[in-house]
Amino acid sequence: MSAAHTQERQMSSDGNPYRPWPARITSILDLTEKEKLFELRIIDPEIREAFQFHAGQFVEVSIFGVGEAPISISSAPSKQGFIELCVRNAGDVTGALHKKRCGDVVGLRGPLGRGFPFEAMKGNDVLLVAGGLGIAPLKSLINHIHDERHEFGKVTIMYGARNPSEVLFRYQFDMWRHRDDFNLMLTVDESDDAWDGEVGLVTKLFEKIDVDPDNTYGAVCGPPVMYEFVIAEMRKKNMDVDKIYMSFERRMKCGIGKCGHCGVGHQYACIDGPVFSYWEAMNLQGAI
Ligand SMILES: Cc1cc2nc3c(=O)[nH]c(=O)nc-3n(C[C@H](O)[C@H](O)[C@H](O)COP(=O)(O)OP(=O)(O)OC[C@H]3O[C@@H](n4cnc5c(N)ncnc54)[C@H](O)[C@@H]3O)c2cc1C
Ligand code: FES
């Protein structure tokens, strides 16, 4: 079923795709100075149960009286009944969300967009590359792979942040770095005395890995400047253009293909993406 059909099916309960569902904040974790992790539960039990999503999809979060913002789902689809959102305090909506407390109610629309091709990735190695806040959607995919680890070959995670204080999900990485079925590689642009990982851009980590090009899917998410360089490294490893997937951020309003704000070439990032294959992106003007 296509993402658009999933959306129609899930939003048709009251026929209005713009109406958000009330959701309660059930946990808030400070990740860094700018980012918090929110756990949300849709209040209506039937809608909560019917809420199924794919890694890489997003929701529109609304703060009543302020507005809406698209935010990627960070938790794994295999964990049901709640979603996690990693939110940077970047402006009006996210700033208002950062002021909320546990028990407060916000609005949610979604799940929206097209996520990563999880089923197609099964049976293959996976190379996940994130920069900065780009780890938010990739964490959903990583956690989903974790929950079905036996379905995948080698799993390599490369994550770059500007400095150690900006590394997100440290608690999770501390867990994964001790496992031998995840090859976790962290790097920062500028280190401090306490940092024991790599220093340099995330692309530097490619020197340290071998890739089986016929059997590896790539997933990339980060600041726009990162894509060109990461993809160049993946192509040097002979990875197929249609096995490299990336998530794009575009300014969005409706999130459901109606307003035209999120055009990428002749497509809309909100329904045709935000996850595109590199092959698709190559054929979309202005995508990269
Ligand atoms: C698919 C998708 C997934 C995303 N996932 C996440 C996520 O997981 N976590 C997360 O924190 N963010 C995520 N974002 C980014 C988030 O949606 C934006 O930061 C959003 O703008 C925040 O809304 P706001 O009202 O808080 O900020 P805004 O008030 O919109 O301000 C955000 C920034 O944009 C600038 N700005 C505002 N309006 C304009 C304009 N018209 N032109 C240029 N600049 C402008 C502001 O000055 C500010 O720097 C995602 C975006 C997309 C499209
Ligand atoms: S956000 Fe309205 S068409 Fe994509």
Image: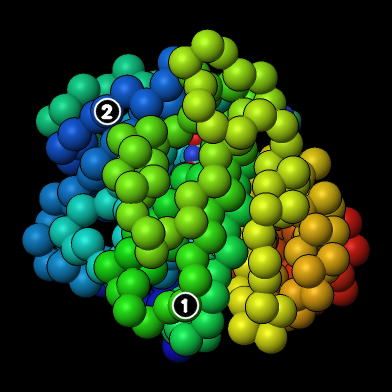
Question: Residue 226: x, y in percent?
Answer: 76, 45
Label 2 – label 1 distance at C-alpha: 32 Å
The answer to the question of whether label 2 and label 1 lie on touching residues, with beta carbons closer than 8 A, is: no
* Camera-side residue of 7 and 237: 237
Of tags 2 and 1, which is closer to the observer? Answer: 1
* Camera-side residue of 107 and 226: 226
Q: What residue appears at the point 47 percent right and 86 percent down from the top-left corner?
A: 123
Q: How many marks?
A: 2
Q: Is residue 128 left or right of residue 147?
A: right
Q: Is residue 99 left or right of residue 261?
A: left
Question: Residue 232: x, y in percent?
Answer: 84, 59
Q: Element at badge 1?
A: loop
Q: What residue appears at the point 54 percent right and 70 percent down from the top-left corner?
A: 126
Asked if 266 appears above or below 152 in the picture, the reply is above
Let me know if residue 31 appears in the view.
Answer: yes
- Residue 91 quadrant: top right
| Residue at numbered disc 1 | 153
Q: What residue appears at the point 62 percent right and 83 percent down from the top-left corner?
A: 215
Q: Farthest residue to the top: give it.
A: 193
Q: Is residue 259 left or right of residue 72?
A: right
First along the sequence among labels 2 and 1: 2
Q: What residue appears at the point 66 percent right and 78 percent down from the top-left corner?
A: 212
Question: Residue 233: x, y in percent?
Answer: 80, 58
* Camera-side residue of 48 and 31: 31
Q: Identify the disc placed on residue 29.
A: 2
Question: Residue 108: x, y in percent?
Answer: 34, 49
Q: Is disc 1 surrounded by few (<14), some (14 to 19) or many (20+) residues within 10 Å?
A: some
